[in-house]
Image: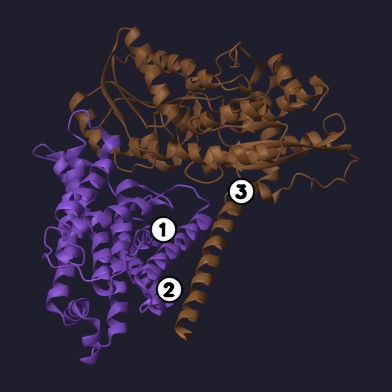
Chain colours: A purple, B brown
Amino acid sequence: MQQLFNGLLIGSFYGLVAIGYSMVYGIIKLLNFAHGDIYMIGAFSGLVFLSIVSPYIGAGWPALILGMLITMLLVGLLGVFIQRVAYRPMLKAPRLSILITALAVSMILYNTVMLLSAGRYRAFNVEISSESFYLGALRLTETRVVLIVAAFALMFIMHMFITKTMYGKAMRAIALDRDTCQLMGIDVYKIIALTFFVGSALAAAAGIMAGVYYGTIHFYMGFLIGLKAFTAAVIGGIGIIPGAMLGGLLLGLLEAFGTQIPFIGTQWKDVFSFAFLILFLIFKPNGLLGRSESERM
Amino acid sequence: MFNIKKHWILMLVAAMLVFGAFGCGEDAADPGDEAPVDENGEAPADFEGQVLIGIMVPTTGSEAADGTDMENAALLAVQEINAAGGVMGHELVTTTGDDGCDPSMATAAASQLVSEEVVALVGGYCSGATLPTLAIYGEAGIPFVIAASNATSLIDENPGWGFMINSTGLDQAATAVAQFEALGVETIGVIDSGDAYSADLKEQTIIQWEEAGYEIVADDTVQRGEVDFSAFVTTIMSTQPDGIYWTGYQAEGALLIRQLREGGYEGEIIVGDGSSAQELIDLAGDAAEGVYCTGPPLTDFLPAAQSFIEGYEANFPREPGAYAALMYDATNLLADAMERAGSFDSAEIRDALEATDGFEGLAGPVMFTEENTLARSNFVVLEAKDGRWSLAE
């Protein structure tokens, strides 16, 4: 039961990061390897914001929510900036070139943060009561409840945005056929920029939530979660937004329960996830929600 | 045509940026550069020549903080030695290899140091990274004073050119067992981070704990860099051991302590010397209060180290970490061995190191066993109190 909750919480972090991965892949067919680092930047920006405002309004929930909104905005803009500077000039280049560009962006981002943070782990201290209470056999803290509610709320808002708004419709249309959209009068570049903004903002939110949950952050924290988010996106069907959320939650649960199997200790957690990724790539390469279609290269 | 050209240029710029970022990264994790060895404010003395010694510590990666502290301590020792006229009229100069706390990086760093023709080496923080380098230095015939690494596996792999001035895992496991007994603990859970050092300390602790007639109720391993310990916490809450021993490093240790306390665990927690940096308490916050540590002789508790601390803080904009004193000792011991050998020949330095008899370091006298390990235990029990480590009563 406890592991179910833990799995859902971790899974929702994976899901939030995976959404950005999946959206970007859907729209410009780019595996954005820098996305994990956006998550890390989100966590660091949140920390910087908190340390600036905490003398005035403390580091409780009001500061945290404000920090989250501002960080999402700033990091979203950073995502747009990266897209404009690094990816847009490469949109018509072979796919491999833009992939390598994404790797370069990733290295630039984490090395920059390493410089600024002196490579040290940083404590993400918030003033939130860590009193725990029980719900049946489930041990909860205020933090955990708020985090999981916030994560699911963000996913829900995201889902509504994609399915119900004009912009969401445009995104889905571009994912289907970019050139036709351009001919139909959709400002493709603007929509791509918007995609990066939303994806980066969600990753930043996940970064801050992870900071609050674990209490420490590090310049390299984005690397593994980037890979996990990729796994989640593939499991759900890459390019499909609800699939990314589902994949993230599923991966979180898999890890939580996989480590409870006797003789599979915590050290096998990542092996477990990535073995699952390979199984999916072999047997169901289009993911859980993906329609099978012949590969067009 | 124009399009292709444009993209080539972009790729080139991207590549330059990447390498630029890498280059900067190394500088950043290396504040030692801020106090070059030769610029000690005095007129350069007349040296007969230079002697190159290698420093091998992690200056990047998760253990960059401790590694940099150690590098700084070695630079400080070298600076002081040179200011006092060097070793037999020769100036000591250093070159640093970054082992990244990673076996493959360490192998590359060791080969690089060997090719630079260092006459001797100091360093060694992560045992897992130090382990594969022992054979490389042994083959090249270069003596290596190992300042911090202390897994028992190093003893077996040592071809005779490594000298360990930190007590080994056997001594530490004994200290941990004694501390658990003193706390009235009867069942423990153990957890390590999968590298040579922490796995070894965990194994030694399990053996000694069971020999003492007690029970191990939980045993787990996590990966380096793990952030989520919920599986272990769940196991702990169902098996309820009286005590927990974490044998890994502080970055993961801080998270483990936080998550254990948040998960409702109220028993005793002891951490190994890999987690003895102040950073553990800073990162774990209030959760760290009352945690014990089987630690190295921390600089703060060594009466002989006061002038060292002052010298360190005057030269570097940070506090010396847990292993800085040992690294300072290692460097001075090496210089002492050169003097005693009366030579800069690697083999003669090795013999002189072997013959070391009571060299007075900050952390106490140094003497080696036949296996080149320190001939006494230097472990102490520390307790986290009011956000600082202090000696436990």
Distance between mark 3 and mark 1 Cα atoms: 22 Å
Residue at 35% in and 13% down: B209
**Mark 3 touches mark 1? (CB < 8 Å):** no
Q: Secondary structure at mark 2?
A: helix
Residue A134 image position (x, y, % from top left): 13, 39
Q: Quadrant of the C terminus of chain A?
A: bottom left
Who is closer to the viewer here, A9 or A271?
A: A271
**Mark 2 touches mark 3? (CB < 8 Å):** no
Q: Residues within 10 Å of mark 2 (few under 14, many from 20)?
A: some
Residue B14 image position (x, y, % from top left): 50, 69
Residue at 41% in and 72% down: A82
Q: Is residue B44 left or right of residue B32?
A: right
The single residue placed furthest to the right in the displayed view is: B46
Q: Is the same chain shared between marks 2 and 1?
A: yes
Q: Is residue B135 left or right of residue B253?
A: right
Identify residue for label 1: A44
Q: Secondary structure at mark 1?
A: helix
- Amino acid, disc 1: Phe
Residue A67 in sight here: yes
Who is closer to the viewer here, A2 or B157?
A: B157
Identify residue for label 3: B30
Residue A180 image position (x, y, % from top left): 21, 87
The single residue placed furthest to the left in the displayed view is: A136
Instruction: Report in which chain the residue with disc 2 lies.
Output: A
Identify residue for label 2: A86
Distance between mark 2 and mark 1 Cα atoms: 22 Å
Instruction: Report in which chain the residue with disc 3 lies.
Output: B
Tag in front: 2 or 1: 2
In which quarter of the view is residue B167 placed?
A: top right
- Amino acid, disc 3: Asp
